[in-house]
Amino acid sequence: MYVRVVRSGPRRYVRLVEGYRDADGRVKQRTVANLGRADQLSDDQVDGIIEGLERAVGRSRNEDSGPEFRRARSFGDLWALHQLWHELGLDQALRKALRSSRREFDAEALIRAMVFNRLSAPRSKRGVLDWLQEDVRVPGLDTEQLHHEHLLRAMDALMTHSARAEEAIAAQLKPLLDQELSVVFWDLTTVRIHGEREVADDLRRYGHSKDLGGVDRQFALGVVQTAEGLPIAHEVFEGNVAETRTLTPMLRRLLSRFPLKRVVVVADRGLLSIDNVDTLEALAEQEGLAVDYILAVPARRYAEFTDLMAELHPKLEEKATTKDEEAVTEATWQGRRLVVAHNPERAVEQSAARRHKVHRLDQLGEALARRLDNQDAGKPGRGRRSTDRSAHRRFHQQIVQNRLSSIVKADLGAENFRYDIDEQAWAAAERLDGKLLLVTSLQEHEATEIVDRYRALADIERGFRVLKSDIQIAPVYHRLPERIRAHAMICFLALVLHRIIRQRLKASGSIYSPQRALQVLRRIQHHQVHLAGQEHEGFTKPTQEQLELFEELGVDVPQRPG
């Protein structure tokens, strides 16, 4: 006797079938019982049938079969992230912002799961579904009936109510800010993205990649961070946006979300333009706010710094009495305070690197000229015959590649191949080596304080590295603008949690990085076992190391999951 599954149209039926021999000895089958449609038989019904058969023949199922262990799932890191998420109030804030009576799934829970995935095991949205259903146990999330479309619809809901969601997130971050004075750091990075087809309002544009250095299809992501290293806002732009156009819209939105009485904006060279400076000063007048700035100056773009550095460079070298000592001085640029810092060690490195490039170009130029002279003398070398035009083209390509067009100049209009090295331009370039030029509206701070404030901007660069390594924001496979924005917001929320973990570990004197801490906690696993007809669950007993990490993070030790 055995079980057979038969099809009738699209349906599958389960039957109990008996094999026997007829009077002529031929093997035949007959149906003993129809057990019903396969898709309608629940686990409890199947268990009931099996237990009934075992009782009928006098067997005890519980005695004959031992415990059945389910697959263990990672739990400890997600428990810690869930506690932080709840402590920040992000669960209630997003649930309120995304509430909808017509939605049959919990959008906040799915957004939370996608945020946790970026910190635990970053995957594509399809990969997230497998991760949720096979690898992990997320507190408060039922994955039994979860589909890939639910994750995408949760992202759509996040963007449909993006204004409410962003306001809700800002409201939860406000208590972490100094309302009297907030120094904010703004920087922009590019995020690589796949896909060739164009869509309406496409964010995916070809532009200069900050990762690869060439041209790539991408979108731009700007992040605002406090002096304490906490990300508080983000903006998504087209991939070919000019950096100078991103500062003003960011600042207006920041002031609309946070009731700050004073803001000091710190940004790098790519964001400096006179229009931006004028706008910052106009905002202060229009809004009645104290809006100050510290902006790095791309000095090599402005000719007026040639004369200014000729005056300041000797003074700075005199102040820097040792190779390791940085010198700082002040001047005025276009009526504004200019702070100049000189790092002698960095200056030596930059000058040596440039000198090496110029020397290599000079060697190339001499080799090209020598080849042309030999050809004219009837002594052609190997390979194709060179011309003055081809020599000019090759030499000019190397000048551009080495970014030395202001120093080494090929005379492309000359009949014969020739080039010059502008010694004055070379000397002017060396005077800018090792220099950091900052224009600022802050008058009450010492010049060294201004430099220190700006150097803290490097922390936002570390945040971008976290986004691209630990959180793996790229590559992005979404093509719709709103899905791209939703992906960016999910990664931004992951960065917020990452930085809060970092702050707490640092405050407690922990030796762990956020990534290492989550790896250690990930070893706490959720277990399920089927025993005596019942499901039992629990988790790995935390080690002393894990207990200390929970204490350093300021979260509770996990309780038995519900």
Image: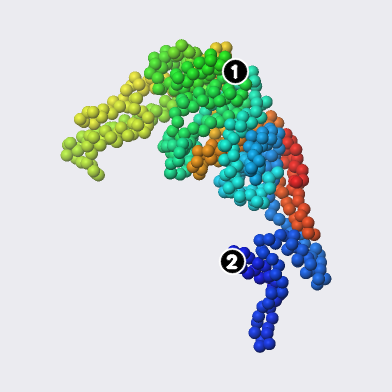
Where does label 2 land, which residue? Answer: 9
In the depicted view, which residue is nearer to us: 461 or 315? 461
- Above or below residue 20? Residue 182 is above
Please give left or right for residue 316 compared with residue 32 in the image.
left
Indicate the quadrant where residue 216 lies.
top left
Tell me if I can see residue 538 in this picture. Answer: yes
Type of amino acid under label 2: Gly
Residue plotted at (69% across, 81% down): 20
In the depicted view, which residue is nearer to us: 338 or 217? 217
| Residue 336 coordinates in the image, percent (x, y) | 48, 13
Mark 2 vs mark 1: in front: 2
User: Disc 2 or 1, which lies upstream in sequence?
Assistant: 2
Give the crowd class for mark 1: few <14, some 14-19, many >=20 residues within 10 Å: some
Indicate the quadrant where residue 31 lies.
bottom right
- Above or below residue 171? Residue 199 is below
Residue plotted at (55% across, 28% down): 458
